[in-house]
Amino acid sequence: MLLRLLTLLCALLCEPTALLLKVSPPRPVDGNPMTLTCESQFARPEPHLQFRFMRHSQVLGRDWDNSSQLQVAAVWSGDTGVYWCEAKTAARRTIRSGGIWIQVQRVPVGNVRLETQPPGGHVAEGEKLVLVCSVTQATGDISFLWYRGALGLNLETKTQRSLTAKLEIPAVRESDADQYYCAADNGHGPSISTLVNIVVTIPVSRPGLTLSTPGAQALVGDTVELHCEAQRGSPPILYRFYCNDVTLGSSSAPSGGGVSFNLSLTAEHSGNYSCEADNGLRAQRSELVPLRVTAPIEDKIDLTSVVTEGLFGILGLIIIVLFFGCWLKRKIGRPSASDPVRCPPLPPPRESTYLNTATPEQRQPVYENVNVVRGDEVYSLAYCVQQEWQPAAAEPLRSYADDRDSSVIYSGVKKMTVTDVDYENDI
């Protein structure tokens, strides 16, 4: 029994093989194709041979095939190992080639770069930051590592068969502002990128507005100082000042902090004041601050005096006009119909001194139209004349024109009808 086992072992080890495995290229590289060929070394060709290829007792490709070649599209460093081929004759006899060691070569990583999204390394607080580590050449599995700061604090490590890997920071904080770099390694040693400076910009907070006046209240002619400041925000910050939403002016703070704005007050500057802070990320408006601008006391007194004097002047003019109107009305007015003017009673008859004993004749009133005033109303002048008969030698006869009294009474006459006649006794 022992002799039989020794004979079989000698046949396997000592009998020269009839198959030869060849590899092309002799030193395959990661990611490149590789071809395996199983050549027959029989003295006489064996018809109807079938072949298969093995690596670490695992069948590559098909189990048995008529082709003596196996095409591998791409090999990687993990495919390194012992390869051989087998052939099966028509008599079902299996022949095995000798094994060969195939080392799949890796290409070292080169030209490692670190890029940021958004580009430039400027990111607003609260936004997402992406650190992209990439290489231009490398084979096999690559380990990517991200570091922060000059001391190289490792943030994360990823291993993948890719030339690019990403690290995401979902919400950046102000404390994340620092220097970053990455490294890549595929077994030939790490390769490091250059440093990238990450700047975290902070949007401005809502600013506060304060007004400083010289006294307890703002007066016309005073100078008021408006101070606007945002507690947080990346510089530079531009501040704008408003009065009733009308822009008064603007000022910039290159290194942060607040700014002041001086304003000489007029009566039109009464209203609500506000300011706005803007650093390019967003603008914030302050709360409204009311300001009432009043005139000085002496100005108020002068104004009151002017107004009072003007009112009294207008009142005096009105009184003068009223007096003049009343006087003029009396001057041209007629007596009231409710109080008619009557002639005085005739004196008692005197004894006649005339030689003629005839009864004296009383003359009738004489009328004379003076002027037509309006419509059908006419003013008439009435004379009241009384004459006694006397001897011709004693006193000549007087005409009614000589007996006119200086007092003249006017009365309205409608349609040439006397409404009122005054009679006077002529002494």
Image (cartoon, rainbow, N blue to C red):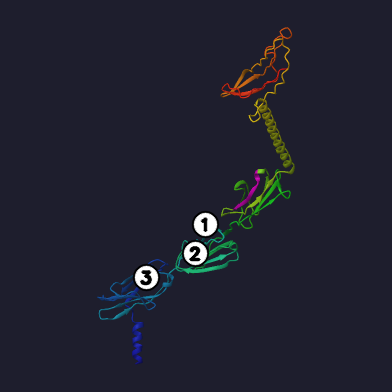
Residue 166 disc label:
2
Element under disc 3 = strand
Which of label 3 and label 1 is nearer to you? 1
For label 1, the SS is helix
Q: Of 156 and 376, which appears nearest the observer?
A: 376
- Horizontal relation, residue 392 to residue 105: left or right: right
Q: Position of residue 348 (x, y in %)?
A: 72, 20
Residue identified by numbered label 3: 23
273 part of magenta stretch? yes
Label count reads 3
Please say if the residues under marks 2 and 1 sit with CB atoms less than 8 Å apart. Answer: no
Seen from the viewer's position, the closer of residues 36 and 324 is 324
Which is the main secondary structure of the residues drawn in magenta?
strand
Q: Residue furthest front?
A: 357
User: Taking 53 as reference, is 292 above or below it?
Assistant: above
Tag shown at residue 119: 1
Point out the frontmost of discs 3 and 2: 2
Asked if the residue under mark 2 is in contact with the one under mark 3, i.e. CB atoms within 8 Å, the reply is: no
**How many C-alpha atoms fall within 10 Å of the one at disc 3: few (<14), some, or many (≥20)?**
some
From the viewer's perspective, is residue 258 above or below residue 267?
A: below
Crowd rating for badge 2 (residues with CA inside 10 Å; few <14, some 14–19, many 20+): some
Say whether disc 2 or disc 1 marks the residue closer to the N-terminus.
1
Whole-angstrom CA distance, mark 3 to mark 2, is: 37 Å
Considering only order in the chain, which callout, 1 or 3, is on the residue closer to the N terminus? 3
- Up-down relation of residue 234 to residue 155 (above or below): above
The N terminus sits in image quarter: bottom left
Amino acid identity at mark 1:
Pro
Q: Rounded to the nearest whole Å, what is the CA distance between mark 2 and mark 1?
A: 14 Å
Q: Given the current orientation, which residue lies at the most extreme bottom position?
A: 1
As rendered, which of 46 and 272 lies closer to the eye?
272
